Amino acid sequence: MKVSVVIPVFNEHGTLPEIVAKVRAVDVDKEIILVDDCSTDGSRSLVETLSRDDDIVGIYHATNRGKGAALRSGFAQARGDVVLVQDADLEYDPRDYMKLLEPIEANRADVVYGSRFAGGESHRVLYFWHSVGNRVLTQLSNMFSNLNLTDMEVCYKAFRREIIQGLPLREDRFGFEPEVTARLARYRKSDGSRLRIFEVGISYAGRTYEEGKKIGWRDGFRALWCIVRYNLGP
């Protein structure tokens, strides 16, 4: 089973080499797709250098379009059996890949979500209100989608390639998370059955705004809109 690891990059010069090294260290057949979203801190040059290697594909946006747009660009180029989302910072540990991939490799799941709130994995203690916001958005998403996720906003999601490439995704920024969740909940396979969605506990080392965290309260309001729009809309 080959895995396409899609990494959106925006001003991550300080962490990009280390996260690429960590992804490379995972013992699984993979390609790494780096999507530079018009970085201004030298990240683009790093992507250009790294993509000279055979296992890395570089994609470049001429303007800053957002995480969701960067992921769509990466998904379109993916050639693996499974597509996995990885942020370019160091909040998520690639050593958790095997947990995400096992249910798909065992043919028990079509999609696997990581969860920062399930299981006994370690996590950095940070913002209380962020954790409250994440849980509220997850519960609202569950009410509309009829799923029982514990962490809808998590970065780590793994999809069978044909599924993620078949979704008509539209959100350009952090609205990707509630949108893709809603579309997966409504997805029907050729036999009319729903997708088999699993969730596994992962570790988490969140970063502060001083360390480069980008999501804010405006993204929270956008997420609310996306939950309603993509669960109830056509």
Image (cartoon, rainbow, N blue to C red):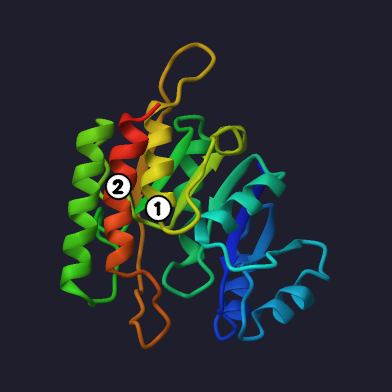
SS assignment at label 2: helix
Q: Quadrant of the C terminus?
A: top left
Residue 212 picture location, percent across and down: 43, 82
Residue 176 picture location, percent across and down: 44, 50
Tell me the residue at 46%/38% (across/down). Answer: 111
Taking 53 as reference, is 3 left or right? Answer: left
Taking 52 as reference, is 212 left or right? Answer: left
Determine which of the numbered discs, if any, sits on residue 175 in the image: 1
Tell me the residue at 24%/58% (across/down). Answer: 134
Taking 216 as reference, is 67 left or right? Answer: right
SS assignment at label 1: loop
Q: Residue furthest top?
A: 191
Picture layout, residue 99 above or below residue 47: above
Taking 73 as reference, is 134 left or right? Answer: left
Picture layout, residue 93 above or below residue 201: below
> Could you tell me how many numbered marks the image carries?
2
Circle 2 packing at 10 Å, graded few (<14), some (14-19), many (20+), is some
Query: Is residue 151 at least partly visible in the picture?
Result: no
Asked whether the beta carbons under mark 2 and mark 1 sit within 8 Å of each other, the answer is: yes
Q: Which residue is mark 2?
A: 225
Q: Quadrant of the N terminus?
A: top right
Three-letter code, disc 1: Gly
**Among the 4 quarters of the image, the one containing residue 123:** bottom left
Picture layout, residue 119 above or below residue 180: below
Three-letter code, disc 2: Trp
Circle 1 packing at 10 Å, graded few (<14), some (14-19), many (20+), is many
